Image (tube, coloured by chain):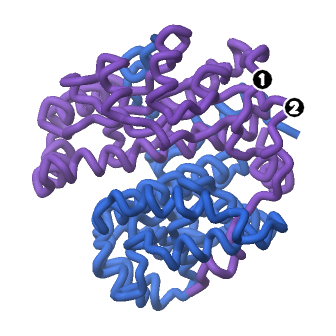
Chain colours: A blue, B purple
């Protein structure tokens, strides 16, 4: 069953960057499972999925992340806290792993996928390592978008968090030299009744300022 | 009214990167309006909305974009075609415009928002122009994610398109020297019954390979 246009808009208008979560309310297992699956199902360039998603539940680890997040309490108070990390490169083993997985899921031989593999490798080779990392980071933001939109249509609050120290996050989460680096984080849960931002009018530019018809 | 977890997952599993659109089917005005609004409502860092979304309806312009898109027919066949462009910098006038808008919508004085303006400016100033452009481009990918997820829950097909020549797009769309540059595109509409990719099993890595619990 799909949403109506009006229900979609209600959900998107209802959502806001939640500043204060109700620390006593937890997202149910069933709903959290769907949100994790929304991350897994996120589309990415060539399907490469150049990411890892770290769901941080350990209160001690969350407490370590807090000072690396401008002290924003969403880190410790939200029901769930996800760190979205991007692959720092896109090398032949990554592409091999993806093509193997595709062959497995789609019941094809890897040989039959060789032309596609060559095309992806050619695309990646034209970039520098830094450009490949940046490319991967952009894909991670699709996942962030899919996660927040999915949360909104399920009635779950979220707060995207760029105001973090990625290097410190990498250290705390053991990502250093792992081939993945923190890109952004997202807190999810239920807004606190005390969060005054919940009722602040949503500020967006006029539609005509951002959408152009050609 | 929200979606159930199962309905969300059905929608996300139903969606795929549509290769062949039914060129005879158009998205209704009502539904398209909601999808444009999903773009307008996309969250962004500090709320800065460093983007423009170009909805390309003119068949002549679409025909010009086709050869700059590896000849992918989604460009001309899809009901709607959106080019997502990122602001190439984040300078003081951009920040001023955003703070003015916020003051207007929230009924505040610009003076009361001066500390926030200083904080945003400080954040932007620590980056090079290239880093600010990259930062903006990542925000655009949140919009891409929100757009595709919104489309899926409305039963609308989409195809994200990175296989385009951004410089040629900028030329065709008049974006050169506009302060905005093409980041990515997205075709939206209805899948053709002939699209064999619609029934290809969706290939994703195992959940355990991309999600880590800490």
Q: Secondary structure at mark 2?
A: loop
Residue B157 lies, in percent from the top left, at 72, 34
Pick the front one: A57 or B124 = B124
> Residue B22 bears which disc, if any?
1
User: Is the C-beta separation of discs 2 and 1 under 8 Å?
Assistant: yes
Pick the front one: A93 or B121 = A93
> What residue lies at 66% left-to-right and 68% top-to-bottom?
A25
Decide: is A211 above or below B131. Answer: above
Q: Taking the image as drawn, is residue A110 in sight?
A: yes
Query: How many numbered callouts?
Result: 2
Q: Quadrant of residue A86?
A: bottom left
Q: Judge from the rendering whether residue B155 lies leftward or rightward of residue B158; answer left or right.
A: right
For disc 2, the marked residue is B193
> What residue lies at 49% left-to-right and 42% top-to-bottom?
B163
Q: Quadrant of residue B85?
A: top left
Residue B13 lies, in percent from the top left, at 79, 52
Residue A189 lies, in percent from the top left, at 61, 63
Q: Judge from the rendering whether residue A73 lies leftward or rightward of residue B197; answer left or right.
A: left
Q: Taking the image as drawn, is residue B41 in sight?
A: no
> What residue lies at 80% left-to-right and 37% top-to-bottom?
B195
């Amino acid at each position: 069953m799909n949403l109506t246009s009006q229900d979609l808009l209600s959900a998107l208008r209802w959502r806001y960057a939640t500043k204060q979560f109700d620390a006593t309310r937890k997202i149910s297992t069933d709903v959290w499972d769907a949100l994790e699956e929304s991350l897994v199902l996120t589309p990415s360039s060539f399907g490469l999925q150049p990411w890892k998603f770290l769901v941080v539940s350990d209160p001690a680890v969350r407490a370590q992340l807090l000072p690396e997040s401008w002290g924003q309490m969403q880190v410790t108070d939200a029901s769930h806290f996800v760190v979205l990390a991007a692959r720092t490169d896109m090398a032949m083993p990554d592409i091999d792993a993806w093509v193997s997985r595709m062959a497995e899921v789609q019941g094809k031989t890897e040989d039959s996928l060789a032309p596609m593999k060559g095309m992806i490798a050619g695309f990646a080779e034209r970039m520098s390592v830094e450009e490949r990392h940046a490319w991967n980071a952009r894909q991670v933001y699709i996942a962030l978008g899919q996660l927040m939109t999915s949360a909104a249509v399920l009635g779950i609050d979220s707060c995207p968090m760029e105001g973090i120290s990625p290097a410190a996050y990498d250290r705390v989460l053991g990502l250093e030299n792992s081939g993945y680096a923190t890109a952004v984080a997202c807190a999810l849960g239920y807004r606190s009744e005390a969060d005054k931002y919940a009722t602040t009018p949503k500020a967006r530019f006029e539609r005509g300022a951002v959408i152009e018809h050609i």
